[in-house]
Amino acid sequence: MNIDKYVESLNWLYEEFYDMDSLSNSLDIILGIRAWDDSVCVEFGNRKLVISVDGPYKKRLVMKSALIHASTDVVVKGAVPLFAMDTLIGNEDDIREMVKSLREQSMALGIPILGGNTLFEDAEPRCNITVVGKLIIDEPIRDSTPERDDIILVLGEPIWGEREERIEKAKKLFDAWFEIIDRGIEINAAKDITKGGLVATLYEISKKSNMKFDIEDEIPFSMTRNLDNFLIFISPEKYEDILEICKKNDLSLYEIGRVLG
């Protein structure tokens, strides 16, 4: 059911926008609609920017970790978030509460919210967030490029709990991830585990890469719930290096399978 809802049900949307990459004459598109990845990556001036739009989030999630959820799509590609923008709808009281929480998340993560749009309306409170990041590696880490015999790992604990707990888990995950990248450890593919959980994430990567996976029978996570940590694919010889960084940062690392080819 999660696969149908979060992956297959969007095939028509991909087909509708498929030719959009070819319409731009002024941008060098690295990850566009045809990549169908978590973020867009474009070369702009002398920088490669990674951009993601996420939501609309319900108020309950906005109050806990909406900016974190929106940022993982950018971070997992190998980019440092530069700033965010929001779009809010709801009555004034709800919007004030959401803004207060977003400010707290912004200050804790160091991701300024520089603008957006607000609609005061007697409607269910919702929020969309756009995050713009700067790629700090040569090419973005795609979700479609695992290699034969790769180890499949889940990096970090699920980002669950109250707002403060989620912020601390996200900061720990991001710090370890950027240390992995700074050390030049090659990640063959990666994706944050969000809509549809592990089952949908694994299915989507398998479908896009035409690879089959051997997944462990017992995995210490829900297979269908959003985890918001990272699913990564690495060659076996990189495992010890990543494990060392995870231990240093007190970050969990779980091996859940291998790529068969």
Image (cartoon, grey):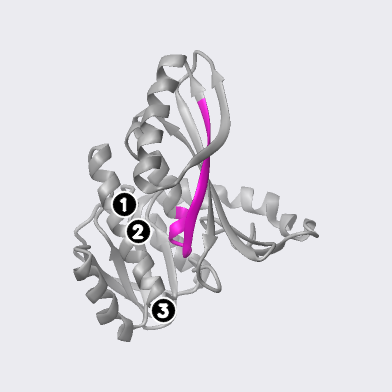
Relative to 102, is 13 above or below? below
Q: Which numbered disc covers residue 170?
A: 1
Left or right relative to 160: residue 112? right
Give the amino acid at mark 2: Phe
Name the spot of residue 210 as percent of width and height, x first: 50, 73
Q: Quadrant of residue 29?
A: bottom right
Residue 49's tag is none
Q: What residue is pinned by disc 2?
A: 174
For disc 3, the neighbor class at 10 Å (few under 14, some 14 to 19, many from 20) is: few
Q: Nearer the viewer, residue 127 or 171?
A: 171
**Cβ atoms at labels 1 and 2 below 8 Å apart:** yes
Picture coordinates of residue 61, whole percent (x, y): 36, 35
Side (left or right) of 22 relative to 176: right
Local crowd at mark 2 within 10 Å, few (<14), some, or many (≥20)?
A: many
Identity, as a three-letter code, of the amino acid under mark 3: Gly
What range is drawn magenta here? 73-88
Distance from disc 1 to disc 2, alpha carbons, whole Å, reads 6 Å
- Residue drawn at x 36%, y 40% is 105
Q: Earlier in the sequence, mark 2 or mark 3?
A: 2
Q: Contact, CB < 8 Å: mark 2 with mark 3?
A: no
Query: In the image, is residue 152 above or below residue 44?
Result: below
**Residue at point 27%, 38% (across, down):** 163
- Which disc number belongs to residue 184? 3
Q: Specify which label sits upstream in the sequence, 1 or 3.
A: 1
Q: Residues within 10 Å of mark 1 (few under 14, many from 20)?
A: many
Q: CA distance from mark 1 to mark 3?
A: 21 Å
